[in-house]
Amino acid sequence: MREILGRRRRLLSRRNNGRTEVLGAAVTFATEWRWPVLPGVAADPQGRAGCGCPDPECTVPGAHPFDPGLLAATTDERMVRWWWTKRPSAPVVLATGGKAPCAVSLPALAAARALDALDRKGMRLGPVVAAPTRWAILVAPYSMEQLGELLYAKDFVPGSLRFHGDGGYIALPPSETGQGQIRWERAPLPGSAAPWVPDVEAVVDAVVEALTRTGVSAPEL
């Protein structure tokens, strides 16, 4: 009986520590880095791979806004604490664009190979967010006009590249989603200042070149 109680206490401790970690991360993003965040919809409690939203074919289970909607994203500490007090295991969702970072994402395997190629080239990158199936490279805010001109100038852009700008979002570590754990592949440097992020032009140029040179055919995921 003591052994069973001990296991329960350890499980509860791990669960509570995880919830505290998510709250702490959300507060840091919002108040220290001034990144607008909001809680994502949780994974379906009846099935970890599913989503708690009404869409049975949700493509990002547990990793998107639902209630509240994306426009509710905020940097207000009181609101953030209230949200995660009510929903302590909710994923942390960043509303991209505006003054917040945007992101360029691609399938995980292609991203890993591209990052290796960029490291060999000596390119400086900021934080990289890794989900089980896709990685997202955080970049400086950009406009749709800027992105359009950038892509128009390219002879080839992999169809698997996705751009998270104004009106977009990504889930941030240490969120747990329907697809699994969100983590830092490249973690921000310690400190209270918002992490440095590169311009979108540099990232797109480098990623397209890396994927082309390494012969990676990034699938449409």
Image (cartoon, rainbow, N blue to C red):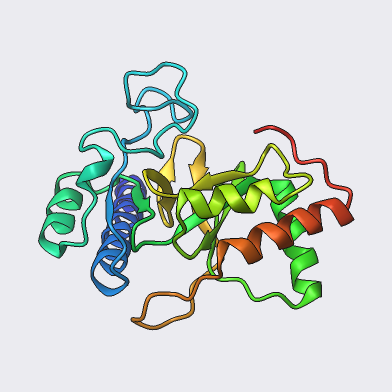
**Which residue: 80% across, 52% down?**
211
Q: Nearer the viewer, residue 207 or 53?
A: 207
Q: Is residue 135 visible?
A: no
Q: Position of residue 212 (x, y in %)?
A: 85, 51
**Which residue: 20% across, 38% down?**
68
Dividing the image into 4 quarters, which one contains the C terminus? top right
Can you tell which quarter of the image residue 36 is in? Answer: bottom left
Q: How many marks?
A: 0
Above or below, 33 against 214 in this view is below
Q: Position of residue 88 (x, y in %)?
A: 24, 49
Q: Is residue 6 visible?
A: yes
Q: Position of residue 139 (x, y in %)?
A: 52, 63
Which residue appears farthest toward the bottom when viewing the image? 191
**Which residue: 42% across, 56% down?**
174
**Which residue: 81% across, 73% down?**
120
Q: Nearer the viewer, residue 8 or 45?
A: 45
* In the image: residue 137, left or right of residue 119: left
Q: Nearer the viewer, residue 152 or 210?
A: 152
Q: Position of residue 92 (x, y in %)?
A: 34, 51
Can you tell which quarter of the image residue 122 is in? Answer: bottom right
Q: Nearer the viewer, residue 156 or 220?
A: 156
Which residue appears farthest toward the top when viewing the image? 56
* In the image: residue 172, left or right of residue 217: left
Dividing the image into 4 quarters, which one contains the N terminus? top left
